Amino acid sequence: MTTVPFVLVALPVPLRTLFHYLAPVPLPAPGTRVSVTFGGRQLVGIVIAGTDQCDFDTNKIKPLDNVIDSQPLISGQLLKFIRWAANYYHAPLGEALQAALPAALRQGDAAQYKADTGTQLWELTEEGRGLPAGALGRARQQASIIKQLQQHGACRWAELKNAGCSREALRALSEKKLIRPTSNLAAPFNAQSPLNLNPEQQAALGAIAPHGFGVYLLDGTTGSGKTEVYLQAIAQALAANPQAQALVLVPEIGLTPQTLARFRHRFGPSVCAVHSGLNDTERLNSWVRAAEGDARIIIGTRSAIFTPMANPALIIIDEEHDGSFKQQDGFRYSARDLAAVRARMLNIPLILGSATPSLEVLQNAHDGRYRHLRLTQRATANQATPIEVINSQPAAEQHGITSEALTALAQHTGAGNQALVFLNRRGFAPVLQCRDCGHQLSCPHCDARLTLHRSPYHLHCHHCDYQRPPAKHCESCQGHRLEPLGAGTERSEEYLNQVFPDTPVIRIDRDSTRNKGALDALINKVHEGEPCILVGTQMLAKGHHFPKVTLVIILDVDSGLFSADFRGPERMGQLITQVAGRAGRADQPGQVLLQSQHGDHPLLQLLLNQGYGQFAQALLDERALTLMPPSAFLVLLRADAPNPAAAMQFLQQARLLAESIQTDQQVQILGPMPALMEKRGQRFRYLLQFKALNRRTLNAYAGKLITLIDAQKTARTIRWSIDIDPQEMG
Ligand code: ADP
Ligand code: ZN
């Protein structure tokens, strides 16, 4: 064994470098956690490699304080993937590793099951279930835990503890693999058998090669049975190898108890969820279950893309177009794009499912890099409903809802059905305006108007969270005729309550669901099936299945047509299609009404008459003409500061550096320019945009530029960031 003098450690600090420490003997393997002293603090770092190179004064290199793991925590495979990601997004490796690990492991806890939280559910493993009586001999505590779990199916740690069980007994059983923690959104397992696939589903499933790398776009209308295809693709993988593991990523608001239940019903306790409702201990336990291979199906949101797996066989991304797969701060990665990289490294298939595929993914499908699989028919009796337009004029609208829409609401609820009114704006009114001078109340910290809320009554900035009581007088002319303009969900709710006093109006948005359990309570009320009107934001667009909803009314999506962000129309088309897909999912036919002031806009007409596929094609053609993604690649360099000149100067300097490394004008530089919202949270925000036709050229260029910027003094005084393949242009 050769010995090297130094070990390179990744630390959770915002510096794009690794840190030298004196190498212990034996050298810990890459992926091992160590604790070190850094700038007077104790930090947990990850060993990346040994080295004999060091440009610093080697007398000042400190030893490691402690080697935490006897085995590497992060496997070579996973470490390679995370390094690839950090490299591609130009993020410090230490920060990328931090994003990839649950908090308990970041802090140095052992990578084993833990019981220190009362809410953690424990259940028997297959071996535990088959344990013959008396097998535990004189270990009475252990036997009593087994007995309790046999009686109750699963128990929370608090219940076991109250019954006199000790932590040691629990640990002993989990080390013997007789029990394991389970995710506490557990739904009952009733061994639901697979459905008979229709011919389209069958063709799609048949096209997915169970082994080897391949990316499949499952482009299927809402309700076409994509989820059933996922379930059977997983079943295929498990049939080929009972130890196989599948990773399923869903959008943040798509990880509902209903979604989990579908997987639990089919696959039982081997399904493990990683969601934001878990506490640190529960997250650690999920991580260990996945790493040890005990969790066969791991369902999670964005960061679950970094889940360790002992026997990875398949990755699935549901609703791949969803914005929540992109991390918008810190380590700005796209879990969807990384999924393709991870699948390639692991040599396994990746399924990207959506009713409204992103233009990036569609382009890959057109170019033949991804296999395009289509489900054009709904799996149930009812076909998707065409969307009818109601042309609305601002003056003709009563509180944002036209009389045609009200008539339809009366008809559907009168017939005993439920209706959904979609409005992507919470609060009462987006603007409070003075009738005398026209002044609108705005946020003192942002370039944004304050939203009026009624419950509780206050003004709120949705960008920086600034709040204040509503003014009695206009700040500008002292007049006292202040008038709310436009409608948010609160106002629609109030108005619909007036018009339909006998029909419950249920509002579902971030405000009405803030308290724990509130969303479940509202959803349960809808599932009781009585006629009602649901009013809500995006939260209603995904994951929930409302069989009694026959009418969907979409209010005010026009802003997407005139958005300053080039992705505005794409997002609008996706939103309309997804929301419309909520209508008539069960045995009743549906009706969809889109209320618009620009009903004859060519893009809207294209979407409504030709469908999302043709609409997306038109947008792709336009992006090809204007050389925007996916026909070109973008990188944003953002900077913000309390002083606008400081941020601007920093970017001007960065532009000079950028020009100095230009070769052959392969990269187009735009800016510095103000962000879409120049002032936000008392900071002034600017950006430089880089564009190139070649992804690799641009990425290498960005890497060079960052090295130059990092070497500048101002790089440490200004807040700046790099965003590779940005999703938001603000
Ligand atoms: P998607 O994921 O495409 O929105 P789902 O998988 O949720 O569609 O399917 C919509 C509905 O159709 C569900 O209620 C599902 O149980 C049902 N379904 C799916 N596939 C079939 C099938 N082959 N036969 C009968 N019903 C099906
Ligand atoms: Zn603000």
Image (cartoon, rainbow, N blue to C red):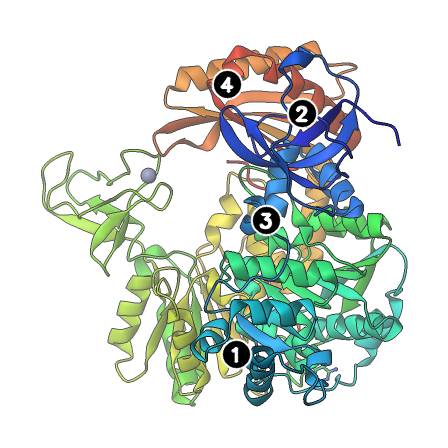
Residue 705 left/right relative to 187 = right
Residue 298, horizontal then vertical, whole percent: 67, 64
Residue 437, horizontal then vertical, whole percent: 17, 38
> Which disc number belongs to residue 387?
none
Q: Spatial distance from mark 2 to mark 1, Cα to Cα?
A: 45 Å
Q: Residue at x 83, y 52 (%)?
A: 346
Q: Label 4 belongs to which residue?
A: 716
Q: Spatial distance from mark 3 to mark 1, Cα to Cα?
A: 25 Å
Of the 4 image quadrants, the one containing the N terminus is top right
In the picture shown, does residue 149 fall above or below 71? Answer: below
Asked if ligand 1 lies within 8 A of label 1, the reply is no
Disc 4 or 2, which lies upstream in sequence? 2
Q: Label 2 belongs to which residue?
A: 21
Q: Amino acid at mark 3?
A: Leu
Q: Label 1 belongs to which residue?
A: 155
Q: Mark 4 against mark 2, which lies toward the viewer? A: 2
Q: Amino acid at mark 4?
A: Arg
Residue 661 left/right relative to 405 = right
> Which disc number belongs to residue 105?
3
Tag 3–tag 1 contact (CB < 8 Å):
no
Q: Amino acid at mark 2?
A: Tyr
Q: Mark 2 against mark 1, which lies toward the viewer? A: 2
Q: Spatial distance from mark 4 to mark 2, Cα to Cα?
A: 24 Å
Disc 1 or 4, which lies upstream in sequence? 1
How crowded is the residue under tag 3: few (<14 C-alpha within 10 Å), some, or many (20+)? Answer: many
Q: Amino acid at mark 1?
A: Cys
Disc 2 or 3, which lies upstream in sequence? 2
